[in-house]
Image (cartoon, grey):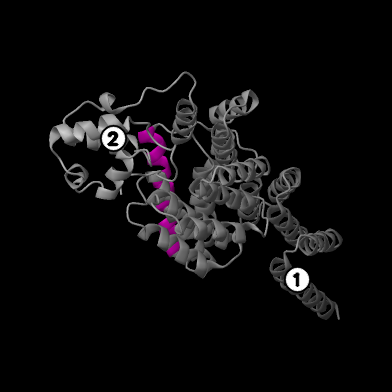
């Protein structure tokens, strides 16, 4: 299917339907002959009747088959048309120029305009804010975009906006993310025609949400399904995200070497995309560097882990992303603890807790206090260790993180058991 975004009557390149049909008649070609192997007869028919708009790629194919310049098939847009405004936002998104996308969309929202223009402005604002790791701001825009697309009776874009709402909720560690994401995919799959890239992205987002819930098997299935969508993976960054997700799910299942291989591929692809496409640095690459650093640390390669974790921090700073740095600071703290550099570890974990609290990152906050408890215990400061473990457990309970709380409780019980055993040994040695 050559129509990548054929979900409503005003999406894609605005063509002159009458000029298109006349050009086909002049060329003496049938709909099937114009479609060839790149498009479908139905797609050409929908474009010719003005029911959908083609992508630039589809327009190029059709113009070549008809032997006419593309410009002869275009309908001239009016000044400051919706077509121009939406195309500008889409181009900024495709170039990953997220800061400019937020600024331009905000300007369009302030100026007002047609319901469709405003719906797209909110949609692209949500996407860009998520990419900038600002999910709390992204969610309201995604919801507003969905509401507006539903009012416009455009279920394709309503489902897409819901999908971005889901992944932003996931970054906020909101338990409703899974339900929203699954609903978005179900609604999208009930429509036709569909974009393979959109369906693949929705499955990738679902894989990320499953991973966050520690449902690693479901995460693997979702990422694998994203790979299997024909024509759904076209960009290096898309493949990198899928490898990244697959790697993290394998790590969760205890397959560290498999995870390391997949995460290495993800980091390599993110680097290649940035180098080849000239794409700006985003959150994806430093997140993958952090995750690969954690896995190779588990495999015992502390030197390589340190290089990856420091690179992740540098790339977060270069991308202007303060959120998410807490996770890498905790990873570095773990590394310093393994190296026996406890003072540095304490400083890193304390900084991570401060950042996690500032951005309301509950997972990182609870992990930080758990890690702080282990560090104080290693230094022999049992009072501060107890206080840190208790704080982690309280945060898990108040945040509804019951499974994580149980894991921490088991760890704390082992700490207490080791402490009691050390005291017994000490008494025996002095007896």
User: Residue 257 in the image: x percent, y percent?
Assistant: 44, 64
For label 1, the residue is 409
Residue 102 placement: quadrant: top right
In this rendering, would 330 be left or right of 231?
A: right
Work out whether residue 18 or residue 87 is closer to the camera in this orientation and state it: 18
Relative to residue 101, is residue 374 depicted above or below? below
> Measuring 35% from the left and 37% from the top, which residue is drawn there?
55
Instruction: Give the CA separation, mark 1 to mark 2.
Output: 61 Å
Q: Outermost residue toward the left?
A: 28
Badge 1: residue crowd in 10 Å (few <14, some 14–19, many ≥20)? some
User: Split into 4 quadrants, where in the image is the C terminus?
Assistant: bottom right
For label 2, the residue is 59
Is residue 295 in view from this perspective? no
- Looking at marks 1 and 2 on the same chain, the residue that comes earlier in the sequence is marked by 2
Q: Is most of the magenta stretch helix, strand or loop?
A: helix
Q: Which callout, 1 or 2, points to the residue nearer the camera?
A: 2
Magenta highlight on residue 393: no
> Which SS class for mark 2?
helix
Q: Which mark is residue 165?
A: none
- Region of the chain picked out in magenta, as a range: 258-277
User: Residue 29 in the image: x percent, y percent?
Assistant: 15, 40
In this rendering, would 265 be left or right of 113?
A: left
């Amino acid at each position: 299917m050559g129509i990548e975004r054929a979900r409503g009557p005003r999406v894609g390149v605005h063509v002159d339907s009458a000029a298109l049909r006349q050009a086909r008649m002049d060329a003496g070609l049938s709909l099937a002959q114009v479609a060839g192997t790149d498009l479908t007869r139905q797609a050409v028919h929908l474009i010719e009747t003005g029911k959908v708009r083609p992508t630039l790629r589809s327009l190029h194919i059709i113009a070549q088959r008809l032997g006419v310049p593309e410009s002869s098939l275009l309908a001239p847009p009016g000044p400051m048309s919706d077509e121009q405004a939406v195309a500008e936002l889409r181009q900024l998104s495709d170039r990953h120029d997220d800061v400019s996308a937020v600024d331009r969309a905000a300007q369009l929202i302030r100026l007002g305009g047609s319901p469709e223009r405003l719906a797209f402005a909110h949609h692209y604002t949500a996407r860009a804010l998520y990419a900038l790791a600002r999910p709390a701001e992204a969610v309201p825009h995604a919801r507003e975009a969905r509401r507006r697309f539903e009012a416009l009776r455009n279920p394709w874009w309503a489902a897409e906006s819901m999908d971005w709402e889901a992944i932003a909720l996931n970054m906020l560690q909101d338990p409703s993310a899974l339900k929203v994401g699954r609903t978005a995919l179900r609604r999208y799959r009930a429509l036709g025609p569909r974009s393979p890239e959109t369906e693949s992205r929705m499955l990738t987002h679902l894989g990320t949400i499953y991973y966050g819930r520690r449902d690693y098997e479901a995460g693997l299935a979702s990422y694998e399904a994203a790979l299997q969508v024909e024509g759904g993976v076209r960009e290096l960054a898309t493949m990198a995200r899928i490898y990244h997700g697959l790697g993290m799910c394998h790590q969760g299942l205890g397959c560290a070497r498999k995870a390391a291989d997949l995460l290495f591929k993800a980091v390599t692809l993110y680097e290649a995309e940035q180098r080849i496409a000239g794409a700006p640095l985003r959150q994806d690459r430093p997140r993958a560097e952090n995750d690969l650093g954690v896995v190779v640390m588990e495999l015992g390669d502390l030197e390589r882990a340190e290089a990856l974790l420091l690179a992740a921090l540098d790339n977060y700073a270069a991308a202007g992303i303060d959120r998410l740095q807490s996770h890498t600071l905790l990873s570095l703290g773990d590394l310093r603890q393994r190296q026996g550099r406890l003072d540095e570890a304490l400083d890193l974990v304390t900084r991570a807790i401060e950042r996690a609290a500032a951005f309301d990152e509950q997972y990182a906050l609870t992990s930080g206090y758990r890690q702080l408890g282990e560090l104080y215990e290693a230094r022999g400061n049992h009072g501060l260790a107890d206080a840190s473990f208790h704080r982690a457990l309280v945060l898990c309970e108040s945040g509804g993180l019951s499974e994580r709380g149980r894991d921490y409780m088991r760890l704390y019980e082992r700490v207490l058991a080791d402490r009691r055993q050390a005291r017994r040994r000490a008494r025996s040695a002095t007896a």
